Image (cartoon, rainbow, N blue to C red):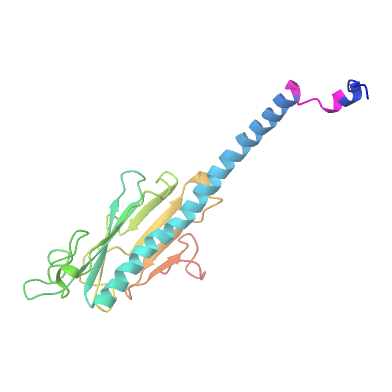
């Protein structure tokens, strides 16, 4: 029969847990890492959102042109201020010419998000307008949108996908400029809508001789 003996002091020292001092040091280091990492991560995410903003608008111009060609109809994209971010929401509508009215900025049976155009040959099953909100984009304090000419907000497309030249004060370009705090991480970008209906991305701060610059 073996006699039980208590563990040695050396064994007890090896089995001890984390001391209060070690725990406090670990928490302090973790807190410092969070203090440094969270702001940097937030800035990185904002910069990515800012760089992706041009894609949001490019999708709208592309959709408007595609729908005009696909339906052999007139289409338009309308930009409206987003009350949450200061960016621009967009909506794409289509319109079919009828004996009663043409498709212009003053008349026409334009589609809505609730109903197709009254002149749509597919009737109630026709195409409804598409609306996209800019809630996910960075606020205007970080990325400022500007349209040219000033105050313009719409582009109208013909059934061939060309920009309708009969519409006065049509939007020619949309420019996105980063704030000073993000100037090193985000390049200014503009979407220039050509008469052929294509929205071309370019850097408005570069000269026209640079392939990345905007056309005159």
* Residue extending furthest toward the front: 1
Question: Residue 203, relative to residue 97: is it above or below?
Answer: above
Q: Quadrant of residue 28?
A: top right
Residue farthest to the left, as pictured: 100
**Residue 4 sits inside the magenta stretch:** no
- Say which of 39 and 20 sits in front: 20
In the picture, the quarter occupied by the N terminus is top right
- Image coordinates for residue 46, horizontal then vertical, percent: 50, 47
Instruction: Give above or below for 2 relative to 96.
Output: above
Residue at the spot x=73%, y=21% of the render? Answer: 20
Foreground of the two, 203 or 126: 126
Q: Is residue 16 magenta?
A: yes
Whole-percent x, y for residue 159 in the image = 24, 77
**How many numbered discs, if any?**
0
Q: Tell me the residue at 35%/69% (across/down).
A: 62
User: On the rendered structure, is 42 left or right of 23?
Assistant: left
- Give the x, y percent position of residue 47: 51, 50
Please provide percent x and percent y for residue 88: 33, 53
Residue 12 to residue 211: above or below: above
Q: Which residue is at the front of the view, 145 or 30?
A: 30
- Residue shown at 33%/57% (left/top)? 147
Quadrant the C terminus occupies: bottom left
Tell me which corner region of the image, top left, top right, bottom left or bottom right, holds residue 198.
Answer: bottom left
Identify which residue, 192 or 111, lies in the foreground: 111
Q: Residue at horizontal 48%, vertical 66%? A: 213
Magenta span: 12-21
């Amino acid at each position: 029969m073996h006699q039980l003996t208590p563990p040695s002091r050396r064994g007890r020292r090896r089995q001890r847990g984390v001391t209060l001092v070690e725990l406090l040091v670990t928490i302090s280091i973790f807190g410092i890492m969070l203090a440094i990492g969270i702001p940097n991560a937030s800035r990185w995410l904002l910069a990515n959102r800012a760089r992706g903003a041009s894609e949001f608008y490019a999708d709208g111009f592309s959709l408007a042109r595609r729908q005009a060609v696909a339906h052999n109809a007139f289409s338009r994209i309308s930009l409206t201020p987003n009350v949450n971010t200061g960016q621009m929401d967009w909506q794409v509508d289509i319109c079919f010419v009828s004996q009663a009215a043409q498709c212009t900025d003053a008349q026409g049976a334009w589609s809505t998000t609730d109903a197709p155009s009254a002149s749509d040959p597919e009737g109630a099953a026709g195409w409804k307008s598409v609306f996209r909100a800019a809630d996910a984009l960075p606020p205007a304090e970080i990325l400022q949108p500007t349209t040219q000419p000033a105050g313009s907000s719409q582009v109208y497309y013909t059934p061939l996908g060309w920009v309708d030249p009969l519409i006065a004060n049509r939007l020619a370009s949309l420019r996105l400029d980063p704030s000073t705090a993000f100037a090193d991480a985000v390049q200014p970008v503009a979407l220039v809508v050509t008469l052929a209906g294509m929205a071309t991305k370019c850097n408005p701060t570069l000269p026209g001789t640079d392939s990345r610059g905007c056309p005159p």
